């Protein structure tokens, strides 16, 4: 099949336009923060695997969905601020109306690239609050909004995007590191609560990844970008495309007995 033939019907060669498989055919997947960066790569990959993709972002969701459709995927875009309870509830309702249900949630929306790093005594309290609102509360609100529709489908998959910073305990970014630690803890606890509903909850923790937000960022991020490859067993830059395989695995049929786990995708930094 090519991108003109609609959803893929089998494994197709690289370079043929729509590379993927049928493993997620018919599944409805919400990717928060899916307009750019890691989320965008995830949205495209789930689309290639046959999922009907909902790009949920506070900006650029419609344009991203248009581009996915132009590439032959099934996609819609919904503008949403994940830190708003009402907005996340509306998101879930709209997806159910549009696509008939929800099978997969990828909690990727997060604040990272726009943060001002600094010693812990100097973190701006408003910025601390905003990070927690988006990265922690936002992930929770999206989980809460999709659990009902997933139960109606007999189960579902939730993949939370954490970060290796929570394991490494990196300096000068305490609010962000704490938020991602909370995401990992929330992954375990919600997996425990939702297992009886056949809703599997896992996390993926990327290392420093050259996303759109990083590319648009300032000198500090450029310095981190230069330093990152030298700290890895696989000594090259990490790209959004490096993250998608773990997400697809945790969203798909091959991981049906895995829940509560966090998969580290960092090219072998071994918590350097
Ligand atoms: P990015 O800045 O390139 O993209 C983030 C996307 O999230 C944007 O489209 C933005 O509009 C959206 N977003 C932000 N706040 C939102 C909100 N309140 N509601 C809805 N959408 C919102 O970021 P990225 O680097 O691709 O990061 C994506 C995720 O991966 C984040 O959770 C981040 O913490 C995590 N992560 C990134 C890295 C990295 O090095 N880039 C490493 C580990 C984890």
Image (spheres, rainbow, N blue to C red):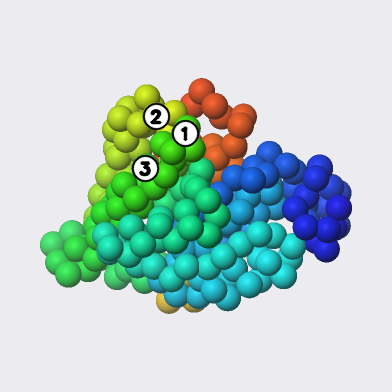
Q: Is residue 83 above or below residue 255?
A: below
* Residue found 58% across the figure and 70% down from its top: 64
Q: Are marks 1 and 2 in contact (CB under 8 Å)?
A: yes
Task: Say which residue label 3 marks.
Answer: 148
The answer to whether residue 269 of the structure is visible from this angle is no
Which one is earlier in the sequence, the residue at label 1 or at label 2?
A: 1
Measuring 54% from the left and 74% from the top, which residue is drawn there? 62
Residue 137 x %, y %: 26, 54
> Is the residue at mark 2 in contact range of ligand 1, meaning its CB lies under 8 Å from it?
no
Q: Residues within 10 Å of mark 2 (few under 14, many from 20)?
A: some
Distance (Cα) linking label 1 and label 2: 6 Å
- Horizontally, residue 109 falls left or right of residue 238, namely left
* SS for dot 2: helix
The residue where tag 1 is placed is 155
**Which is more toward the observer, 168 or 195?**
195
Helix, strand or loop at mark 3: helix
x then y, percent, for residue 183: 32, 45
Disc sitting over residue 197 in the figure: 2
Q: Residues within 10 Å of mark 1 (few under 14, many from 20)?
A: many
Residue 48 visible to an observer of this rendering: yes
Q: Earlier in the sequence, mark 3 or mark 1?
A: 3
Q: Residues within 10 Å of mark 3 (few under 14, many from 20)?
A: some
Along the line of sight, the residue nearer the viewer: 267 or 101? 101
N-term mark: 2 or 3: 3
């Amino acid at each position: 099949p090519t991108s003109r033939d609609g959803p893929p019907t089998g494994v197709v060669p690289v370079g043929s336009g729509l590379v993927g498989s049928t493993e997620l055919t018919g599944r409805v997947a919400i990717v928060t923060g899916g307009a750019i960066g890691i989320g965008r790569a995830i949205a495209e990959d789930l689309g290639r695997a046959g999922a009907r993709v909902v790009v949920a972002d506070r900006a650029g969701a419609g344009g991203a969905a248009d581009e996915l459709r132009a590439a032959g995927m099934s996609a819609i875009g919904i503008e949403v601020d994940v830190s708003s309870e009402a907005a996340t509830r509306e998101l879930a309702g709209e997806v159910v109306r549009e696509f008939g249900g929800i099978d997969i949630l990828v909690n990727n929306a997060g604040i990272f690239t726009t943060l001002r790093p600094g010693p812990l005594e100097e973190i701006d309290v408003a910025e601390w609050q905003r990070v927690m609102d988006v990265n922690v509360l936002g992930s929770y609100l999206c989980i809460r909004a999709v659990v009902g529709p997933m139960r109606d489908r007999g189960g579902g998959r939730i993949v939370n995007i954490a970060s290796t910073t929570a394991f490494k305990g990196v300096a000068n970014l305490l609010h962000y590191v704490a938020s991602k630690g909370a995401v990992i803890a929330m992954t375990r606890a919600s997996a425990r609560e939702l297992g009886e509903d056949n809703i599997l909850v896992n996390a993926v923790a990327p290392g420093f990844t050259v996303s759109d937000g990083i590319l648009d960022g300032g000198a500090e991020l450029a310095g981190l970008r230069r330093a990152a490859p030298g700290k890895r067993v696989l000594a090259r830059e990490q790209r959004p495309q490096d993250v998608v395989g773990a997400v697809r695995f945790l969203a798909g049929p091959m991981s049906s007995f895995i829940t509560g786990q966090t998969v580290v995708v960092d090219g072998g930094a071994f918590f350097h």
